[in-house]
Image (spheres, coloured by chain):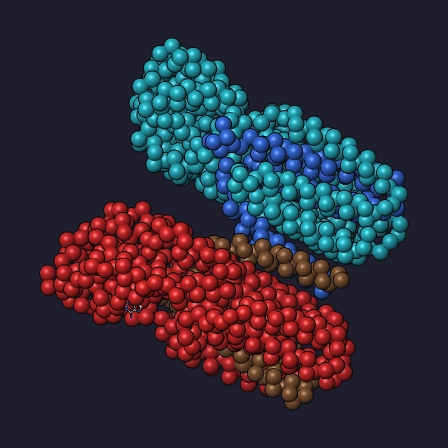
Chain colours: A blue, B brown, C cyan, D red
Amino acid sequence: MEGLIASLTVFVLAIFVGFEVITKVPPTLHTPLMSGSNAISGITLVGALLSAGHQHSLLATVLGFVAVVFATVNVVGGFLVTHRMLGMFRKKEDR
Amino acid sequence: MEGLIASLTVFVLAIFVGFEVITKVPPTLHTPLMSGSNAISGITLVGALLSAGHQHSLLATVLGFVAVVFATVNVVGGFLVTHRMLGMFRKKEDR
Amino acid sequence: MSGALINLTYLAASALFVFCLKGLSHPRTAVRGNLLGALGMLLAVAVTLLDRQIVSFEVILAGVLAGSAVGAVFAVKVPMTAMPQMVALFNGFGGGASLLVAGASFLETVSKGGPLPAQFLVAVAATGIIGAVTFWGSLVAFGKLQGLVTERAVVFRGQQAVNAALGLVSVILGAWLVLRPEDPAGYLALSAVASVLGVLLVIPIGGADMPVVIALLNSYSGLAGAATGFVLGNNVLIIAGSLVGASGIILTRIMCLAMNRSLGNVLFGIGGTVGTGAAPGDEIYEGRVKAASPEEVAMVFDAARRVVVVPGYGMAVSQAQHAVRDLANLLESRGVEVEFAVHPVAGRMPGHMNVLLAEANIPYDRLKEMDEANPGFAQTDVALVIGANDVVNPLARTDPEGPIAGMPILDVDKARTVVVVKRSLSPGFAGIPNPLFAADNTLMLFGDGKKAILDLVAALKEF
Amino acid sequence: MSGALINLTYLAASALFVFCLKGLSHPRTAVRGNLLGALGMLLAVAVTLLDRQIVSFEVILAGVLAGSAVGAVFAVKVPMTAMPQMVALFNGFGGGASLLVAGASFLETVSKGGPLPAQFLVAVAATGIIGAVTFWGSLVAFGKLQGLVTERAVVFRGQQAVNAALGLVSVILGAWLVLRPEDPAGYLALSAVASVLGVLLVIPIGGADMPVVIALLNSYSGLAGAATGFVLGNNVLIIAGSLVGASGIILTRIMCLAMNRSLGNVLFGIGGTVGTGAAPGDEIYEGRVKAASPEEVAMVFDAARRVVVVPGYGMAVSQAQHAVRDLANLLESRGVEVEFAVHPVAGRMPGHMNVLLAEANIPYDRLKEMDEANPGFAQTDVALVIGANDVVNPLARTDPEGPIAGMPILDVDKARTVVVVKRSLSPGFAGIPNPLFAADNTLMLFGDGKKAILDLVAALKEF
Ligand SMILES: NC(=O)c1ccc[n+]([C@@H]2O[C@H](COP(=O)([O-])OP(=O)(O)OC[C@H]3O[C@@H](n4cnc5c(N)ncnc54)[C@H](OP(=O)(O)O)[C@@H]3O)[C@@H](O)[C@H]2O)c1
Ligand SMILES: NC(=O)c1ccc[n+]([C@@H]2O[C@H](COP(=O)([O-])OP(=O)(O)OC[C@H]3O[C@@H](n4cnc5c(N)ncnc54)[C@H](OP(=O)(O)O)[C@@H]3O)[C@@H](O)[C@H]2O)c1
């Protein structure tokens, strides 16, 4: 129960941070925001690793492997594609 | 050690929230911000209560009592004075 | 590696995620922000791997390598115009990972006969449901945006009742899983039902409304991550999950506000339904539409002193952004003031047009948001609408019953002359006719977006 | 009451503090925000009291009642012009509470022979030092602002060396306390040394720089609260403490930026030092200053179409805000456009002028910030400077060596006519002459701020 409330505290604070920070993102950057935050949602990879890391039955190993592949595609693809997009944004002077 | 890092996590998040929220306060409201956040700093009152609440030697009781008085002055005075100030801010239409 | 060090690293990763999103508040800091986010992820993953020096380490490594390769290829190969479907696809992978993680750890624990606390089981059920819905929903969204599945809203009688029933069944199966965890088949059943639900939830939604769905699914997957964090007592999962959850919800809200539609309206395919059955608008267009040749349009441009370009979905389809850039440069070299006005929901994703124009090397400070651009149209000689339709449809102001009633639009009709580039008189996503095309001061330049602009540039060079 | 419920309540209180500060981002929501903050505090205190149903409950209750009464009287009685010293005083009480709390729990534990973990001792030492410095520093700040102690910077040779030595001694005493906690005298010694340090740290700082000190001390007391939270493992202390800490640091930064001075410069009394020894500026004023009567000034106002009022510390001293409001209303009733331009460090506290003008019922949307107001001075007929000096001193732009070099100022000298209301030609806080008073387009209206404005109103009514 103590642990739950500690988690809840972190959750509430993180939601506050999220709302404050994200409402500041300008419309110009909404596509990168979408792909970037999608990449961050790949944090489930850590969950995947934590559970794939135990001793395993074959089925669980296979599931774990596929989960890791999926999550990594999400993370690596997400950050890379965001990077590619952001690299294109230029100010007048840079031309 | 675990507890320390949990506290640190809360601290880091709260600092983020604080910076994001407070940088949005306009100069018009800087005086109320100062007195309001000063009132919040009176949260030490809770610390005071938590430590004044144990079985006590006379000295500790006296110290605890004075601490509670001081902290309450800070809290009650701070919020009241802020309220008084804020009550004066009016938009054009309200006149 | 000590537990404290690991948790400190997770904390650092969480802080990096916050800095990542903070960086995205300005194009100047955005690249660095994104790199910080990637660094945070690298830290979190690396420390988790180090922490788990175990048998299946090779399996994990193989998985990470394979995933990185696939992700990198996708990310480098995808054209900018296909960004919406790419995000949908990645989002689907994320959901799939959640589904599998929950499954793997559940099966593992059951087969070993380990303890199954209720908290763990609730999280497994929740993660399974959200993961399956996200996975299949995102795949359908991908299919619609990529043109593999029909873009139209697929609506059938009683659809909402079916969805409600499926949702209820998933919840019941979840409860069953918590009460009778011994039987692994429960998880399979739950995944199957949630998968069907995921598909059915998304098919009634029209192609252009996909970004709302993706943002929402993304927010769900963030919340699923946070839920996992509650179960594992892992703060980085909670924090990153909440950040993603907040981002998805905010984006959803922004889009709905920009269309003046409620979330329910989007999700139940109501906008799409209206679209399917709307009138072709012949009586509005009849005899009033003035088609012009590139040469005629070039003449208008030749006399202009201030031009505002309004891009829309058609610019993305025809990949006309580079041609538009050339046109803008040509006009500027002749002393014309050129500005770009971007509607918040132009295209098929929030910020879609901004990315395309950035790709064409148009500096971001030249792009004006709606509120900034609208007062300027009255002083504009030519408004060039390229592939936009709904976002410049004056019916939003005048017809209080229509599907886009009350949606804030770009007031191009206030400009002296409006030039509209599109292939036909067919409607945009909302499926309604556009009186702008029949206005006195409008010239239609029919043709594929890119080709039409190139013709225009060529004609303009003749002058 | 269960621990979980208590912690949930603490979480709710923390969230309420965040909403409190969020509310302060707009005057419309600020009152509600402040009430939410007070509610949060009430919750936190009430739940703590309920949790501790013990012998000294009556003592606690008595303390809370006494404190509330004193606080309420102060808060209701204080005039708005005395707000800076009020905040300083309250801040001092907060610091005193921290000092006493740490002492009480330390003495208690020692006298009982309870366990003294290092973590606890470190926090006691840190809280004790910060608490004592905050208490005494705030009291000196209060004295200076209230005029009980000289406003001037009190500087003596080797002051910084003495302060450094005292700081070092406090830290050593703190370390000793951690290593040899058996002897309660250690805490007394530590408090005594830190108290002297608190006094000495603040006396070299000039009266007008007090807000920086108060903001900084406030931020320290927040951080001390957070430190206490680390020791007690109490999240509401950590969160509230961090919020206060962040607020103090941000305010400090804003003030320093608005004066173009470094924090070190403020804290070591350098600005004050220069002030004490600066030249009277006779050669600048000689023969060039034009004093005017209220009637002459009224004539100028009678011909004006646009007037900008620039208030400063002198308006607070003379309590002229209501008179200024009457003047503004009179001018407006004659069709003159009246605007107020507020410099970020005008007065003796950030936002000081805004509160005073709000007290006089001037709507907040009539007050312009510096960046907004400056472009308007070129189109202004009369700039009325009332009791402001440094914040309108053009030397900030022209003299790269002076104490206010590079400080952003209000460009009143760009107005067609400048009317300056003050009692004499004596300098403002920075202690330097002001060439504005000798400018060709400046008229001086000498006299106490309130009286001068009332005379002006009377004269204007004659027209
Ligand atoms: N962006 C978002 O985040 C988002 C989110 C939710 C909903 N939406 C919805 O999406 C719509 C976006 O509006 P919009 O004005 O950008 O697009 P639109 O209203 O969907 O219209 C696009 C127009 O582009 C034309 N077009 C298509 N291919 C073309 C080509 N190759 N060359 C030239 N023209 C071509 C089409 O006309 P022809 O067929 O005659 O060529 C069509 O009328 C709105 O209804 C909005 O509510 C967007
Ligand atoms: N606000 C903040 O947060 C803050 C923070 C740190 C530092 N400061 C410093 O405080 C100063 C504030 O500038 P300021 O322009 O507001 O004030 P100032 O430069 O200190 O000048 C105030 C002027 O008011 C006049 N005055 C005093 N009593 C008066 C009365 N009864 N009637 C009429 N005039 C009266 C004085 O001239 P006479 O004696 O001739 O009447 C004096 O020149 C700046 O130097 C700033 O850097 C402010």
From this view, report whether residue D370 is shown above or below residue D178: above
Q: Residue at x 51, y 46 (%)?
A: A24
Could you say which is closer to the camera, residue C144 or residue A32?
A: A32
Quarter of the displayed picture in which ligand 2 can be seen: bottom left
**Residue nearest the viewer, comparing D145 with C306:** D145
Residue that protrudes farthest toward the top in the picture: C462
Residue C209 visible to the viewer:
no
Q: Position of residue B12 (x, y in %)?
A: 63, 57
Query: Measured from the top left, where is residue A30 in percent x and y?
Result: 54, 38
Q: Which residue sits at x=81%, y=46%?
A: C50
Q: In this figure, what is the number of numbered marks?
A: 0
Front-most of residues C347 and C307: C307
Q: Does any portion of residue C238 appear in the rendered image?
A: yes
- Relative to residue D240, is residue C330 depicted above or below? above
| Foreground of the two, D127 or B58 | D127
Residue found at the far left of this picture: D463
Horizontal side of D307 relative to D21 (left or right) equals left
Residue C303's quadrant in the figure? top left
Q: Is residue C181 left or right of residue C70?
A: right
Quadrant where the C terminus of chain C is found in the figure: top left
The spot of residue B35 in percent (x, y) is 46, 68
In the image, what residue occupies the spot 64% across and 73% down? D170
Is C313 above or below relative to D311? above
Which quadrant holds residue B30? bottom left
**In this picture, residue D259 sits left or right of residue C186:** left
**Residue drawn at point x = 42 percent, y = 80 percent:** D73
Counting from the top left corner in percent of width and height, residue C207 is at: 56, 30
